[in-house]
Amino acid sequence: MKDTSALALQRLSHVYVGDKGASLAVEDIDLSVAKGEFVSLVGPSGCGKTTLLSLMAGLFPPTAGKVLLGGEPVKGPTPKVGYMLQQDYLFPWRSIRDNAAIGLEIQGSKSKASMKRVDEWLKELGLEGLGGRFPHELSGGMRQRVALARTMVTEPEVLLLDEPFSALDLHIKMQLEDVVVETLRKLGKTAVLVTHDLSEAAAMSDRVIVLGKNPGHIRKEIKVPDEIKSADPITARKLPGFQVLFEELWAELNAVDRKEGGGDA
Ligand SMILES: Nc1ncnc2c1ncn2[C@@H]1O[C@H](COP(=O)(O)OP(=O)(O)OP(=O)(O)O)[C@@H](O)[C@H]1O
């Protein structure tokens, strides 16, 4: 039967081979993400979160198992998947508008119509009138908005978010979490977030996957209650059930640490 999820990992394992021999990073991971769903991956350092995102993005093939995107095997990087990272990687010599258009250039789809889309995204993300400025003239939060515009302009189906807010001040980070959730919900996009911040995972997600390590594996899946996941992340944190959810995640991560000598969450 054809897999109908937006993104699926099936019996996925990955072994890194280097000078010091082979090491099993993740083993036997099964995960299905539905279209429009927001899933977070949390777990101790070294449990394989970035490895999983890289495999989802098709940056390298898994040692065993499959990654499916819309039911089709991922064979390499594809424009259907967008990536947002902790660093914004804006080019300092390019204007904000030209930075936001870089994905289009790489795809060879830069045109008058697609540049109109760039302008619309800059406006949508609160950057109207700043297209002619340069990255050094913008704050960290605004630069991450440009990075989000650059990603959204290429119209990916799935967004992979690798700690994109971790370098930002708390209130900027919370504002941006809201912007990302609102944008993805409006367009029905699918997202997978890697974060060390349990509050962020709880406030943004429909589902949180807690990973264990040695090798990386799925330890527990925690569904976010409806009242929390239907609120925006800032409001979600104020709801009575939020603390309960946070405590559940906290207890689970501490259990990983006790069992596996975890490292930072
Ligand atoms: N290129 C590589 N070569 C060899 N081993 C690697 C490589 N990349 C990652 N690993 C190992 O694979 C395991 C998973 O690493 P990964 O970076 O995916 O974990 P992580 O959960 O993202 O960690 P962190 O939270 O610290 O970013 C670790 O044991 C790591 O040392």
Image (spheres, helix red, strand yellow):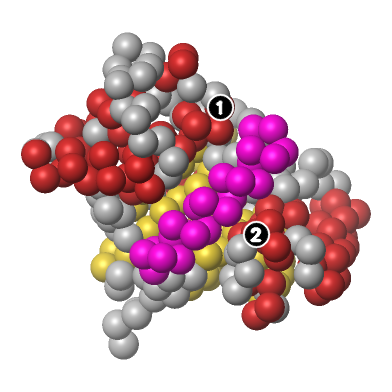
Q: Position of residue 32 (x, y in %)?
A: 48, 72
Residue sitting nearer the eye, 8 or 113:
113
Q: Position of residue 93 (x, y in %)?
A: 32, 12
Please tell me whether residue 172 belongs to the stretch shown in magenta: yes
Residue at 57% over, 45% down: 176
**In the displayed structure, does residue 173 sit left or right of residue 143?**
right
- Residue 175 vs 65, above or below: the answer is above
Quadrant of the image for the N terminus?
A: bottom left
**Circle 2: element type:** helix
Q: Amino acid at mark 1?
A: Gly
Magenta part of the chain: 168-191
Q: Are marks 1 and 2 in contact (CB under 8 Å)?
A: no
- Residue 55 marker: none
Question: Which residue bears the numbered disc 2?
Answer: 233
Residue 4 quadrant: bottom left
Magenta stretch: helix, strand or loop mostly: helix
Question: Which residue bears the numbered disc 1?
Answer: 140
Please tell me whether residue 62 belongs to the stretch shown in magenta: no
- Residue 131 vs 191, above or below: the answer is above
Residue at 47% over, 29% down: 143
Residue 43 visible in rendering: no
Q: Is mark 2 within 8 Å of ligand 1?
A: no
Residue sitting nearer the eye, 109 or 45:
109
Residue sitting nearer the eye, 55 or 39:
39
